[in-house]
Structure formats: structure tokens, C-alpha cells
């Protein structure tokens, strides 16, 4: 029998978690405000995720603040003659305030603006236009004709634009392709597209996305980790180990990187190095059953069967429905000649995972044959006496 080591990789914490300072949020807020306003009248370069720029130009902050101030003063001056302008503007201002970054909405995927937050505030702009544009026409009949034509053209344009924009949501690849086209330095988009490429088995393309992240953020340890996982799936073990090294250098307490590097060492036959990595991973995070399971495979390969059984026992204790651990423990018992005990573990593994467990089924058949052979030899001895 051979032990089965799953190729699944551990999933680490998100290194993109970032908290913006109050000063940065206050500086960026006017820029975000004007960006929402701009997209109201010119809905261009819309996307699922807008990355945050680490630096804000002084003229961006100053120009945005001045524009907000001027419009606010103007609507207050005109409040007696055109109150709808005041109502609409302050509707927009008050309802947009919570989503311009003064309050950081997300830590795991830091962003300042999002198109979906614009729906309610845009009602204010609608109020300003609905009452403001008709007031520009004194003649009622001409007002109806012109506004009707303008309304039809506007609705046709927005319908066409919406249809075009919906096309980017055809699938995840298209969505993130568009995000990367209309934004710059978008590491989140590269990371998410890389994850999609991983899911569909296009590991080389995923590696290219992680390459881009590393170019933009050389200290992004998760990009090295993810790229290592792709190299591992392509059986490029040297490249995988190199990237795991770098991820661990950048984050020395990265338990999952130790675990995955240990798994690669296991696959490449470097069992002692694998055990050392599993030891480190378990020291950092001793509640993960897969850590003990894979360390047990390393001990098995080194012929340390009793120690490997202790690890498989611990894995099963942490995860009682761990089919792979039962199969691996059964394989160890089989190698030790304890065929009945091995058979019980193989059968339990099949029960826990009846749909996709060919390894346990094959091992169960081997155990049955071994038991049958063992019983046959005992019968021969009895008859010989």
C-alpha cells in the first residue's frame, strides 16, 4: 500500500487587511465624493473593485473640496427660489457621507468607493434634475416636446450602456479582466483572477497574475504563497519551494506556508525536511488535522510506523470524519502486518467518503487478500500437525 497525501493546500489569513489612518480617510473623502458625482453624470470605467491609491495629489484634494464647497454655498443661496436644488444636493451629500471612506467599510479588501453605494444618494441628483431642468423652459408646450425627446434619448443611452456593462459580468474572468483594464495597480483584481484560473486548472495563467502582484508589492507574502501553490500543482517543486521560502521569510509565523512546503517535500521524497516543516506548522497552529495527517505520511515514508500512527490518531481526534487519515492509518497497520486493524480503518474510510475513495477501496481489497492468505497459511499449519 501507499499512503495518500492530498494535494489540497492550506488557506492562510488575508494579508490585504489594512486599516487607513484617520488623516488619510479625511483627505481622501472629498476625492471619493467628487468621484461618485462624476460617475453620476458620466458613468465610465465602472468596475467591481476600485483600488485605493496610497498617495493623493494635493490638487485632487483641494479641487474636490473647493467644488463641494461652491455647490453647497450656491444651493443655500438659491434655497428660497429653487429649494429643490438644496434638498437634492443635501440628500446626495448626507447619504453619500458614510460611504466616502470616512468610515472604513472593509479591512480585508480595502476600498474607498463602490458603485453599489451610489444608488440611494443618486436620488438627490435626480431631484435636482427633475425640478431644475423643467424650470429652464418657460413655455409649457416646448417644455413637453423638448423634455420628452431628451428623456427618450437619455433612457436609450442608459439602457445601451447598462446592456454593455452587464456583458462584463458574463463570468469571473471577464469581470476581473475589465477591472484590470479600467484601473491600475489593482492587486486585488490580479489576486482574484489568479484564484479563478486556479479553480479552472489554468495554473500558468494564475502564476502570471501572482507575478504581477509581486512586481507591484514585493513584500506581498501571500502572492509568493499562492504562486508556490500553482508551481506545486504543476509539479514544479523547486520553484514551489523557492516561493514558500520567500513567503516564510516575509512572514516567519506563516504556519500554512510551512505545511504546504512540507507537503511538497513529501511529494519530492525529502521526508525529513517535510517532517521539520510539519513540526514548525504544528508548533504555530496545532488544531489542524491535515498537519498531523501529512506529518504522519512523512514518518511512514521513513519507516517510523508507530510515530506515524500517533499522528494519524491525533488527526482523527481533531477531525473524526477524516477519511484520508483513516486510510493512511490503515496503510500503516497493513505495513506492520496488522491486517484486521488495517481492514477496519479502510472500511471506515470508505464509509466516510463513499463517492470518491478509490485508494481506500483498493487498500481494503489488499487487506482482505492478506487476511485470506494469512488464514490459509494458518489452516495449512493446523492440518500439517
Image (spheres, rainbow, N blue to C red):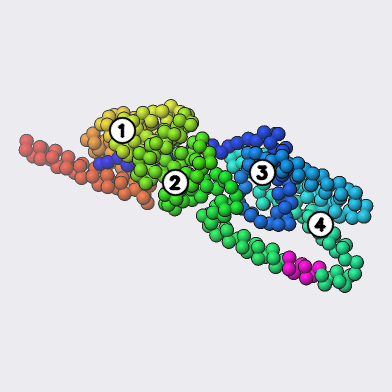
Q: Secondary structure at mark 4?
A: helix
Distance Cα–Cα, label 4 vs label 3: 25 Å
In the image, residue 259 sits, relative to residue 193, either above or below, namely above
Distance Cα–Cα, label 3 vs label 2: 28 Å
Q: Which residue is mark 3?
A: 112
Q: In the rendering, at what x and y percent does residue 357 appear? A: 34, 48
Distance Cα–Cα, label 2 vs label 1: 27 Å
> Mark 2 vs mark 1: which is more N-terminal?
2
Q: Are marks 4 and 3 in contact (CB under 8 Å)?
A: no
Q: Which residue is mark 2?
A: 207
Q: In the rendering, at what x and y percent does residue 382 appear? A: 10, 37
> Which numbered mark, 4 or 3, is in the foreground of this view?
3
The tag on residue 127 is 4
Q: In the rendering, at what x and y percent does residue 334 appear? A: 25, 38
> Mark 1 vs mark 3: which is more N-terminal?
3
Residue occupying image coordinates x 20% and y 42%: 370
In the image, residue 271 sits, relative to residue 39, either above or below, namely above
Write down the region rendered in magenta: 147-154
> Mark 1 vs mark 4: which is more N-terminal?
4
The tag on residue 299 is none
Visible residue check, residue 328: no
Name the residue nearer the viewer: 78 or 382: 78
Residue occupying image coordinates x 83% and y 62%: 133
Q: Residues within 10 Å of mark 4 (few under 14, many from 20)?
A: some
Q: Quadrant of residue 62?
A: top right
In this rendering, position of residue 5 left or right of residue 117: left
Q: Are marks 2 and 4 in contact (CB under 8 Å)?
A: no
Q: Which residue is mark 1?
A: 271
In this rendering, position of residue 196 left or right of residue 236: right
Q: Quadrant of residue 56?
A: top right
Amino acid at each position: 500500500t501507499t499512503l495518500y497525501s492530498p494535494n489540497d493546500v492550506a488557506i492562510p489569513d488575508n494579508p490585504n487587511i489594512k486599516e487607513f489612518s484617520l488623516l488619510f480617510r479625511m483627505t481622501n473623502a472629498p476625492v471619493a465624493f467628487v468621484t461618485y458625482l462624476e460617475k453620476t453624470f458620466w458613468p465610465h470605467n465602472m468596475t467591481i473593485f476600485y483600488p485605493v491609491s496610497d498617495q493623493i495629489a494635493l490638487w485632487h484634494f483641494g479641487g474636490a473640496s473647493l467644488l463641494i464647497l461652491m455647490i453647497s454655498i450656491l444651493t443655500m443661496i438659491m434655497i428660497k427660489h429653487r429649494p429643490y436644488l438644496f434638498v437634492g444636493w443635501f440628500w446626495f451629500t448626507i447619504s453619500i457621507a458614510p460611504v466616502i471612506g470616512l468610515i472604513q467599510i472593509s479591512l480585508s479588501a480595502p476600498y474607498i468607493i463602490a458603485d453599489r453605494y451610489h444608488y440611494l444618494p443618486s436620488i438627490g441628483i435626480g431631484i435636482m434634475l427633475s425640478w431644475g431642468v423643467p424650470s429652464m423652459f418657460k413655455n409649457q408646450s416646448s417644455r413637453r416636446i423638448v423634455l420628452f425627446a431628451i428623456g427618450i434619448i437619455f433612457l436609450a443611452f442608459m439602457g445601451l450602456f447598462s446592456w454593455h456593462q452587464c456583458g462584463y459580468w458574463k463570468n469571473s474572468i471577464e469581470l476581473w479582466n475589465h477591472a484590470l483594464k479600467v484601473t491600475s495597480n489593482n492587486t486585488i483584481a490580479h489576486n482574484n483572477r489568479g484564484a479563478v484560473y486556479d479553480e479552472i486548472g489554468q495554473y500558468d495563467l494564475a502564476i502570471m497574475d501572482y507575478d504581477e502582484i509581486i512586481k507591484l508589492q514585493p513584500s506581498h507574502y501571500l502572492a509568493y504563497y499562492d504562486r508556490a501553490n500553482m508551481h506545486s500543482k504543476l509539479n514544479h517543486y523547486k520553484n514551489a519551494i523557492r516561493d514558500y521560502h520567500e513567503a516564510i521569510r516575509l512572514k516567519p509565523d506563516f504556519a500554512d506556508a510551512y505545511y504546504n512546503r512540507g507537503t511538497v517535500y513529501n511529494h519530492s521524497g525529502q521526508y525529513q525536511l517535510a517532517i521539520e516543516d510539519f513540526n514548525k506548522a504544528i508548533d504555530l497552529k496545532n488544531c489542524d488535522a491535515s498537519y498531523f495527517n501529512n506529518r504522519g505520511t512523512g514518518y511512514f515514508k521513513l519507516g517510523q510506523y508507530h510515530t506515524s500512527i500517533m499522528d494519524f490518531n491525533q488527526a482523527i481526534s481533531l477531525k473524526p470524519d477524516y477519511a484520508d487519515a483513516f486510510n493512511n492509518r490503515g496503510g500503516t497497520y497493513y505495513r506492520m502486518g496488522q491486517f484486521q486493524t488495517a481492514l477496519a480503518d479502510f472500511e471506515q474510510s470508505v464509509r466516510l467518503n463513499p463517492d470518491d475513495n478509490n485508494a481506500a477501496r483498493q487498500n481494503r481489497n489488499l487487506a482482505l487478500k492478506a487476511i485470506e492468505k494469512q488464514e490459509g497459511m494458518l489452516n495449512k499449519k493446523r492440518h500439517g500437525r
